[in-house]
Amino acid sequence: MVGLQPTDVPPTTAVKFVGAGTAACFADLLTFPLDTAKVRLQIQGESQSEKAIQNVRYRGVLGTITTMVKTEGPSSLYNGLVAGLHRQMSFASIRIGLYDSVKQFYTPKGAENSSIIVRILAGCTTGAMAVTCAQPTDVVKVRFQASVRLGPGSCRKYSGTMDAYRTIAREEGIRGLWKGTLPNITRNAIVNCAEMVTYDMIKEALIDRHLMTDNFPCHFISAFSAGFCATVVASPVDVVKTRYINSPPGRYSSTVDCMLKTLSQEGPTAFYKGFTPSFLRLGSWNVMMFVTYEQLKRALMKLQMSWESSFQPK
């Protein structure tokens, strides 16, 4: 057996909520450079007029990371990390932590198991709820990751994370902080369905068929499969979302305009720019997040039960 064993009492909604946000932050800390490399590859080619982008070319995951370290320093790989952690604590807590509760809400009374339609509805619902709450953090994260800083003399638009929130709100209005909400809702509905439904169904099948027990190997295989499915179906929407959020006012009239311009100027393969770092990032992120999440749920429940038992009359 690997890791903590399941508790007799199922995890509460509060435990899932806190555990999901904490596990997502841990996964983000370890995989953030891959996410930054993905963003740079996705926006490459859209702004040929920017001198910094013209002078810097990114080739592949390792090439992008190496180029960034050489031209901007190692810290550039973690541009936007604070906003990323803000995002995960609000975003993952809702879309992952509330998934089981929403799934139970949609499941008809008396049904033994939730159907795939119910699971998809739950994934779409929590994904949309999470984006609505956490979109400003995603806008700031992408702006930091996309910004190229060449040398100590180059200017930097934002002095810090809180300054970025203020600057965007001042220059683009409050609506600027929710820029790209629609493509992000679309993306995260897709990603959440691919991740949560795939993880949920594969884990359930492995346990029900007695192929594995509810422990680390089962969580690892389920999470890796979820990461691959999510990357395949979400990459086109992710590219459009990243470009639209990062674009200056006036470049694209809408997300559809962004999609059409990308298609006409760079062809359909542009929608899979950054696929390798996306998969490396989503695959590794899912494994780290779900494995940590499962262990955190068990640890927090043991802690809660121990704390409650200390107040029971002897």
Image (cartoon, rainbow, N blue to C red):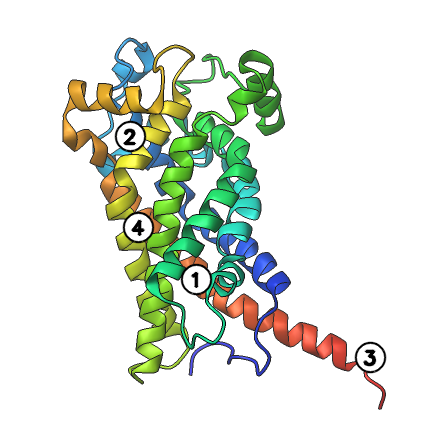
Q: CA distance from mark 2 to mark 3?
A: 54 Å
Tell me residue 95's x, y (percent): 49, 51
Residue 290 numbered tag? 1
1 or 3: tag closer to the N-terminus:
1
Residue type at numbered disc 3? Phe
Instruction: Please say if the residues under marks 3 and 4 sit with CB atoms less than 8 Å apart.
Output: no
Find the distance from the CA under tag 1 to the CA under tag 4: 14 Å
221 left or right, relative to 173: left
Say if residue 159 shows up in the picture.
Answer: no
Residue 311: mark: 3
Give the mark, 2 or 1, whose residue is nearer the N terminus: 2
Name the secondary structure under disc 3.
Answer: loop
First in sequence: mark 2 vs mark 3? 2
Can I make out residue 308 in this image?
A: yes
Q: Earlier in the sequence, mark 4 or mark 2?
A: 2
Question: Residue at (54%, 35%) from the top-left corner?
Answer: 83
Q: Which mark is residue 230?
A: 4
Q: Amino acid at mark 2?
A: Gln
Q: Who comes first in sequence, dot 3 or dot 4?
A: 4
| In the image, residue 17 above or below residue 244 | below
Which secondary structure lies at badge 1?
helix
Residue that carries the numbered disc 2 in the rendered image: 42
Tag 1: amino acid: Phe
Q: Residue at the location (27% across, 30% down)?
A: 41
Q: Quadrant of the N terminus?
A: bottom left
Camera-side mark, 1 or 4: 4
